[in-house]
Amino acid sequence: MNSVSGKKNKSVGGFRAKSLIIPLAIVLAILHAVIVAMIVRVSYNSNKQSVVMRNYSEYIADATSLLAGSSLLSETARTYILMPETEGGVVNYGPLLGYVEEYSVKRRGSDVVARFEGYDVDKKARDYVAAAALNADKMVDAQLHAIELMRSVYPLPNIPALDGILRYGLIETEIALSDDEKRDRAFELVCGDDYNLYKRDVSDLVGKCNAELKEEQAKISVETLSAVNVTRTVLWIAAMLVIALLFAMFVVFYKLFLSPITGFVNKISKDDPLDESKGIYEVRMLAFSYNKLLSRRNTLENVLRDAAECDALTKLPNRYSFNRAIDKDDESGYSAAVVLFDINYLKLTNDTQGHLAGDALICRSAECILKCFGNAYNNNCFRFGGDEFAAIVVDVSPEDIKTMLEKFRDTQKEYNVSIAYGYEYARDIGDTSLRKLFFEADKKMYANKMDTHFGEFND
């Protein structure tokens, strides 16, 4: 077709833009090279600044984690030493489970010191961390010593998780101590002056390390920002030259290029096809390309609309679909229930097992909900939040809802999930609305979630 070929054609006619663009492009290319060089320089310095900020934030966080880990180990050990038994006379091993968990995290003294050896920081900061780590290790030694003394008085239950506590070798004189003397000795180990001095030194040394790191960071940032400012000045000058040249190009091409394009504005705003027979060759090609894109857009529009209403992870209808479903008005003559769900322990799963495990938990929960409450079209269950789901069930009796919930409680075990829920039911939706049912179900779901977690806390 002549109008879209690369050959010159009388039916196309007009002035070819390249006869003016080529000489102008040469000038623009030179300015472009200057601008690119400046942008690269700015980008390099900006990236350097970002890397410095990020790295030093990581260094500070790493040093702070030593203090946080040391404090957590200290508090859990002290809790056990001060209250080795519950009110019911049972060994209070709960704090030791937390102790084991924290002890396994790679933020103890030697771990942090090893990482700091690979950091590009001043030796003074590394020395502070090493000194803090030494005191933190002394605290751990005192903690393990005290725990060993207490467990000789209060034997720990045979729980595999507690095997993570390193055994401390007691000397014969300590073994021979009475129970009260062992308790006093353990208390002195984790609450005495020496221990408190170690603890204070860890805090002070980590603080000095962080202050040193911040000072280094500030110095590097000032140097980098100075270089960025100089480069930006050169870039600004080059940009002004480009703008002046582009303005000249605009004046030249107005009648040859822009004037016919302005005629397309009304048609484009109405989504009408453009006339491919007017304008210079480039304009006609633009019209031809636009018409192809318009046709393709119309084809893809329905596909995109479907994608906008579906949750990408679970394939359930999303929040947009849920809001549309519950905002239906002036309906009556059928019963309905809105059931809300909230996944328990999602944050814990993300924090301890990673977000892939969290996504898997969300998908299992969605399958569990759909299996118990989904209709024949699988379009009445929704994911409208990160860990929040909903189901709209119609033409059911209160007994049907109770049966679904009983099945749901059993199915949770099958899918290895824990989901809080709440529902509200109406015999005739005309007496209320789905949104009102939603608000009431939300309150009940929240109460159910609180009962679940409060019950675990009491246990």
Image (cartoon, rainbow, N blue to C red):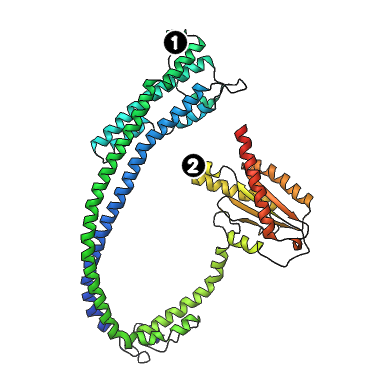
Q: Position of residue 113 (x, y in %)?
A: 32, 33
Badge 1 density bin: few <14, some 14–19, many ≥20, Cα 10 Å = few
- Give the tally of numbered discs: 2
Q: Position of residue 176 (x, y in %)?
A: 47, 7
Q: Quadrant of residue 395?
A: bottom right
Q: Nearer the viewer, mark 1 or mark 2?
A: 1
Q: Is residue 239 left or right of residue 135?
A: left
Please tell me the numbered disc located at residue 174: 1
Q: Secondary structure at mark 2?
A: helix
Residue 370 visible in the picture? no
Marks 1,2: beta carbons within 8 A: no
Please tell me the numbered disc located at residue 351: 2
Q: Earlier in the sequence, mark 1 or mark 2?
A: 1
Q: Position of residue 237 (x, y in %)?
A: 21, 69
Query: Where does the C terminus fall, quadrant-wise?
Result: top right
Query: Which amino acid type corresponds to the residue marked 2 in the rendered image?
Result: Asp
